[in-house]
Amino acid sequence: MEAKQKKSYTVPVLLVCVVILAVLCILFYSSSLLNQQNEKSDRGMRLSEKYVFSQTYASLLREGAEQLLGASSETDRLQAKEKLGEARFASMEAVGLIGEALRMREGMAEEEAKHVKEQLLGALWSSDSPLNTVGEHEGRLTETERTMLENVAVSAAKAEGALGKFRAPSGIAGYRIMAGGGEWLDTVLEAKASLDAIADAVSKPILNP
């Protein structure tokens, strides 16, 4: 009789244990999935912000170069230099986004991407880059400076056009999609070709008289 009672208790207890374990597994999986989704949302939001900064960079760079080329007064030149200065600070986000695109689309290793970014930053961000020192002298721009600025304006416009093909998301669903890749990778790499052209244009020596 006691054996039968023990047996009758064993099955329900086992069932309760199984149910508890199943519930715990579901809770753990749900929590893990939620964390992954949150991480994906956060990553997508950061990418979206970088994308907007990249668009701003291309726009400011084009406007600054064009305005400096057409400057007819010291005030015009100062305003143009201000735009180029603002563009300089946005360049870090643009270059950072290029690094992300290189890793995600082309499978580039971290060290390789870092090398590409450092080369671009040396030309676009460095305080002694010709792009940031152009026009800092009295008198008219030199022919070398004008040639550089013309090349910069054209290439920046191309980068601006490439980045304009994609609209950065502003909601959680869009952030998650962006974090997984998509068309923005192609537009960023297309813009990279233009930024490479700008880096080449500003690598020419002795811009200032």
Image: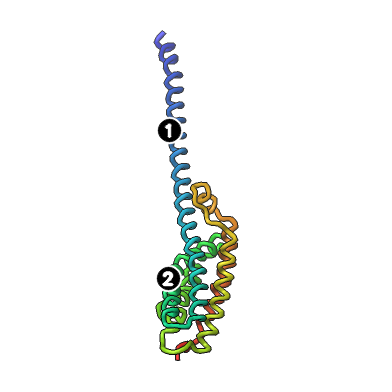
The correct choice, above or below, for 3 with respect to 187 in the image is above
Assign the N terminus to one quadrant of the image: top left
Direction bottom: furthest residue: 209
In front of the other: 42 or 27: 42
Instruction: Say how many tags the image has.
Output: 2
Outermost top residue: 1
* Earlier residue among tags 2 and 1: 1
Horizontally, residue 160 falls left or right of residue 86, namely right
The one nearer the camera, 85 or 99, is 85
**How far apart are the alpha carbons under marks 2 and 1?**
53 Å
188 sits left or right of 121 in the view: right
Q: Position of residue 110 (x, y in %)?
A: 48, 65
Q: Is residue 29 above or below residue 101?
A: above
Would you name the residue on which mark 1 appears?
Answer: 24
Label at residue 86: 2
Q: Nearer the viewer, mark 2 or mark 1?
A: 2
